[in-house]
Image: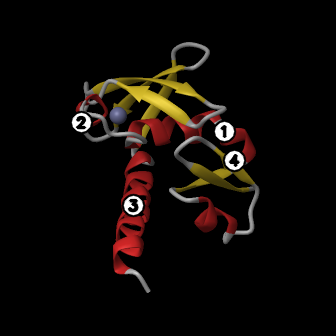
Amino acid sequence: MNEQQTVPQRRNVVRLKALQRASRRLLVEQTGAASYRVSSASQAGRSYYVLIDPETLTGQCTCPWAQYGGVNCKHVLAVLQAHYAGRGALSFWADPGAARRQHRPIIAGEHLYVTVRR
Ligand SMILES: [Zn+2]
């Protein structure tokens, strides 16, 4: 097994799972067709603005992490979950193989894969 190939991928998966957990503690409010305000549930008054493209599962966020080039921050994940709430509970995956192993319907984005549990 090649450590140099598997380790970064696993780290990516762990990070996505941590971000997904953190995203559940956020309050999401739709402000336009594809725009949302995301607020911290624990720190009143702190909110960021997110614009998503639901087809590619991508988003732009005003949080510091996204400003420095981070993709799929917890705010974008929270908005995607809210956007697709009618379909069921979402799980986020960094690579298509991990998503396929869930044996659930998959929404494939540009840098992100989502499985849906009804
Ligand atoms: Zn963000």
- Do tag 2 and tag 1 residues touch (Cβ < 8 Å)? no
Residue 106 on image: x %, y %: 71, 53
- Do tag 1 and tag 4 residues touch (Cβ < 8 Å)? yes
Position of residue 106 relative to residue 55, above or below, is below
Marks 1/4: CA–CA distance? 10 Å
Label for residue 107?
A: 4
Question: Label 3 sits on what residue type?
Answer: Asn
Q: Residue furthest top?
A: 32
- Do tag 2 and tag 3 residues touch (Cβ < 8 Å)? no
Of 81 and 26, which appears nearest the observer? 81
> Considering only order in the chain, which callout, 3 or 2, is on the residue closer to the N terminus?
3
> Considering only order in the chain, which callout, 4 or 1, is on the residue closer to the N terminus?
1
Question: In which of the image's four quarters is ligand 1 placed?
Answer: top left
> Considering only order in the chain, which callout, 1 or 3, is on the residue closer to the N terminus?
3
| Residue designated by label 1 | 84
Of 16 and 86, which appears nearest the observer? 16
Question: Label 2 sits on what residue type?
Answer: Gln
Decide if residue 37 is on the left or right side of residue 70.
Answer: right
User: In front: mark 3 or mark 1?
Assistant: 3
Residue 95 on image: x %, y %: 55, 59
Decide if residue 81 is on the left or right side of residue 4.
Answer: right
Q: Secondary structure at mark 3?
A: helix
User: In front: mark 2 or mark 1?
Assistant: 1
| Residue designated by label 3 | 12
| Residue designated by label 2 | 43
Residue 34 on image: x %, y %: 58, 19
Marks 3/1: CA–CA distance? 23 Å
Name the image quarter holding residue 30: top right
